[in-house]
Amino acid sequence: MSTTETDVTPAITLTETAAIKVAELLADEGNPELALRVAVRPGGCSGFSYEMFFDSDLADDDTTSAFGNVRVVVDPTSAGLLQGATLDFKDGLQGAGFSINNPNASRTCGCGNSFS
């Protein structure tokens, strides 16, 4: 399902459900220049936290991947911490939201947004 715009393996992949939801959210923004930026930042209760937002300011060293009509960008530092990770979207009785399954995380916290 995924194709990369560069010759680099995507740092993070999107499930089909996540790609559909992100595409809906991007369409609501009404700006075709936007991409989903996924980043890892220092902080959170376990050492690192995930950050996701729409961004049109792409750097030359960003890894860019496409999942359907959704472009996903990751900065080089975050790419190493996200390699092999998957972004999913769940919509269930206990709420809806995005989650990241990261094989590089040795420990996660209860909030699901922080890891080490």
Image (cartoon, rainbow, N blue to C red):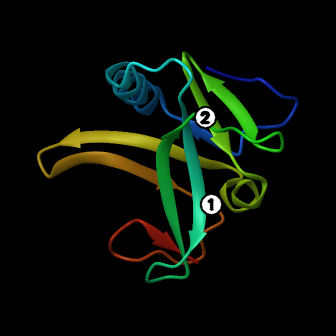
Tell me: 77 left or right of 110: right
Q: Nearer the viewer, residue 28 or 95?
A: 28
Q: Is residue 105 above or below residue 51?
A: below
Label 1, on which residue? 103
Give the Cα separation between the discs numbered 1 and 2.
Answer: 19 Å
In the picture, which quadrant includes the N terminus?
top right
Q: Which secondary structure lies at badge 2?
A: strand
Q: Quadrant of residue 112?
A: bottom left
Q: Which mark is residue 72?
A: 2
x 35%, y 22%: residue: 24
Residue 67 position, x and y percent, is 59, 23
Q: Amino acid at mark 2?
A: Val
| First reached walking from the N terminus: tag 1 or tag 2 | 2
Against 42, residue 5 (above or below) is: above
Q: Residue at x 23, y 39 (%)?
A: 91
The residue carrying pointer 1 sits among few (fewer than 14), some (14 to 19) or many (20 or more) residues within 10 Å by Cα, namely: few
Which quarter of the figure has residue 103?
Answer: bottom right
Tell me which amino acid carries mark 1.
Pro
The quarter of the image holding the C terminus is bottom right
Mark 1 secondary-structure assignment: loop
Disc number lying in front (1 or 2)? 2
Q: Which mark is residue 51?
A: none
Mark 1 vs 2: CB contact within 8 A: no
Q: In the rendering, at what x and y percent does residue 53 appear? A: 47, 45
Residue drawn at the location 53% of the way across and 28% of the way down: 34
Q: Residues within 10 Å of mark 2 (few under 14, many from 20)?
A: many
Front-most of 32 and 111?
32
3 to the left or right of 110: right
Which residue is at 49% across, 57% downward? Answer: 51
Report x, y in % for residue 27: 37, 19
Work out which residue is located at the far left of the displayed protein and give it.
93
